[in-house]
Image: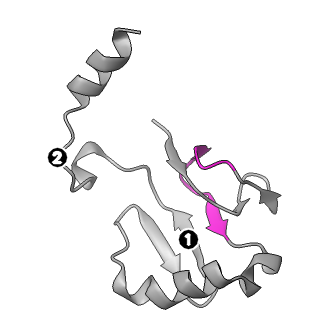
Amino acid sequence: MLFTVSASVILGRKPGRRVNIPSFLVKAGDVVSWREESKDSEMFKVVCGSLKKRRVPGWLTLDESEVQGTVVSLPEENDFEANIDTRLIVEFYSRR
């Protein structure tokens, strides 16, 4: 199972690789961070201001000083708080 994430940079497998695809697949051990040029943006300031209010899931680690996260492991089904019936998703896409 792979997990998708929105990210500016994926370090780890290919250090410094720029990613602008919201559905980019990450693996355990990947490090996700902002590009240096993006750290001056208004969005970066908003994200940094809200970091302390957010709960980091157990399958991720966050380095607030570097504003980067590491995928420790892939999430399990019970790691999600939302009540998602995966059977309905499979059923929907199998009709296509």
Disc 2, SS: loop
With respect to residue 24, does 68 lie above or below? below
Question: Few, some or many C-alpha atoms within 10 Å of disc 1 (few <14, some 14-19, many ≥20)?
Answer: some
Please report the residue visible at 17 percent of the width from the left and 46 percent of the height from the top. Answer: 83
Q: In the image, what residue type sits under mark 2?
A: Asn
Are the residues tagged 2 and 1 within 8 Å (C-beta)? no
With respect to residue 90, does 63 lie above or below? below
| Cα–Cα span, label 2 and label 1 | 25 Å
The quadrant in which residue 37 appears is bottom right
Residue bounds of the magenta highlight = 21-33
Please report the residue visible at 27 percent of the width from the left and 54 percent of the height from the top. Answer: 79
Q: Which residue is mark 2?
A: 83
The quadrant in which residue 81 appears is bottom left
Residue 62 coordinates in the image, percent (x, y): 50, 77
With respect to residue 48, does 89 lie above or below? above
Q: Which residue is mark 1?
A: 69
Residue 42 coordinates in the image, percent (x, y): 66, 84
Please report the residue visible at 44 percent of the width from the left and 54 percent of the height from the top. Answer: 73
Foreground mark, 2 or 1, reads 2
Among numbered discs 2 and 1, the one appearing first in the sequence: 1
